[in-house]
Image (tube, helix red, strand yellow):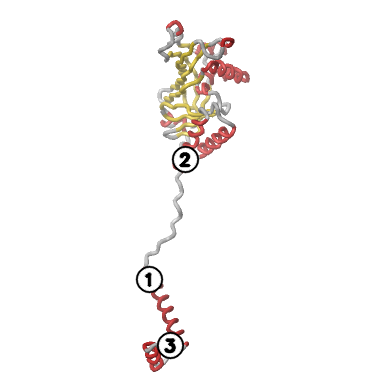
Amino acid sequence: MSSASTLSARVAHSAGVRAPGGARRSFRATRIVSRAVAEDESSSSAVYQPAVAPEQPSGADVNAAAKKRLLAVAAASGRGLDATPAQKTAASSLIAELIAANPNPEPATSPTIDGDWELVYSDTFLFRSSPFFWAVGSMMGDTADFFYQAHSHQTGIFGGGVGRVVQTVDTKGGRLISDCVVKASVGIPLLGFSPVFAGYGSVITAGRCAAKDGTRLAVTAETTTVRQDDANVLPQLNFLNGTTVPVEDVMKQVGGGEAGPEVYLDTFYLDDEMRISKLEDGSVFVYQRC
């Protein structure tokens, strides 16, 4: 474009006269090119920032969420005792999820397993957290289920039942102790369902334990002690308080062996807060550190 044409266009623009169409298109193209050049220079001088993928939750966060949901199911189902089919399915799924993400590959030999653990969920009778019942089940074989059902009926009649259940593991000392609070009631069915008297106490079973491999503890029950915790029970009805039964000796006589039956507890999930263990028959126990 000549200088004369440019000057003419500028004069026409200043005088309010529209420039010819070709001049307007030329001005527009010039502005577009100038803006593109400026943007290119600006982007080339900026520091390159790579795209950042959204942060994924860590394994610990995923486990924490699963543990929280499992504890909610446990609380809503009476530690599994009153679990509905849907709650049992939910608990089983969460347990499997946690086991798959177990942060401790050898829980039985880890110092983390030592300490006091309270039972918060089980898919079987709560009293089976005691090694006494592991040993009895081992001796009774296929008839053990009948024994468990009978014991559950006996302890649950007239409002009785199982209270707090704590398991203490001491692998350094080679000991495992179960402390199970039991509420016992006595009544006369023909006179109604209210008990004549009721009381509660602890049934404490102690035994030897040793790691067999990275997940398995071998346990032998030695003694079971009855401790009366209810101060309101009449002294005449408190005759069992402090009684210790040498269960290993009794089982040796019954079974004819040199030692009581050795039973196994396998742990498949362990962290600082929660432990998930199973018996040989697959029964599950979920414990929370006290």
Task: Check disc 1 and give the amino acid type.
Answer: Ser
Q: Nearer the viewer, residue 163 or 10?
A: 10
* Residue 188 visible in the shown view: yes
Q: Along the polypeptide, which appears first: circle 3 or circle 2?
A: 3
Mark in the foreground, 3 or 1: 3
Residue 34: x and y in percent read 40, 78
Is residue 271 rendered to the left or right of residue 153? left
* Residue 213 visible in the shown view: no
Mark number for residue 65?
Answer: 2
The image quarter containing residue 228 is top left
Q: Along the polypeptide, which appears first: circle 3 or circle 1?
A: 3
Query: Disc 3, disc 1: CB below 8 Å?
Result: no
Pointer 1 residue: 42
Task: Check disc 3 and give the amino acid type.
Answer: Arg
For label 2, the crowd category at 10 Å Cα-Cα, with few meaning under 14, some 14 to 19 and many 20 or more, is few
Residue 121: x and y in percent read 51, 29
| Residue at 54% over, 11% down | 187
- Where 45 falls versus 20 (above or below)? above
Q: CA distance from mark 1 to mark 2?
A: 46 Å
Quadrant (top left, top right, bottom left, bottom right) of the C terminus = top left
Q: Nearer the viewer, residue 100 or 4?
A: 4
Residue 117: x and y in percent read 44, 27
**Secondary structure of residue under mark 3:** loop
The image quarter containing residue 135 is top right
Query: Disc 3, disc 2: CB below 8 Å?
Result: no
For label 1, the crowd category at 10 Å Cα-Cα, with few meaning under 14, some 14 to 19 and many 20 or more, is few
Pointer 3 residue: 18
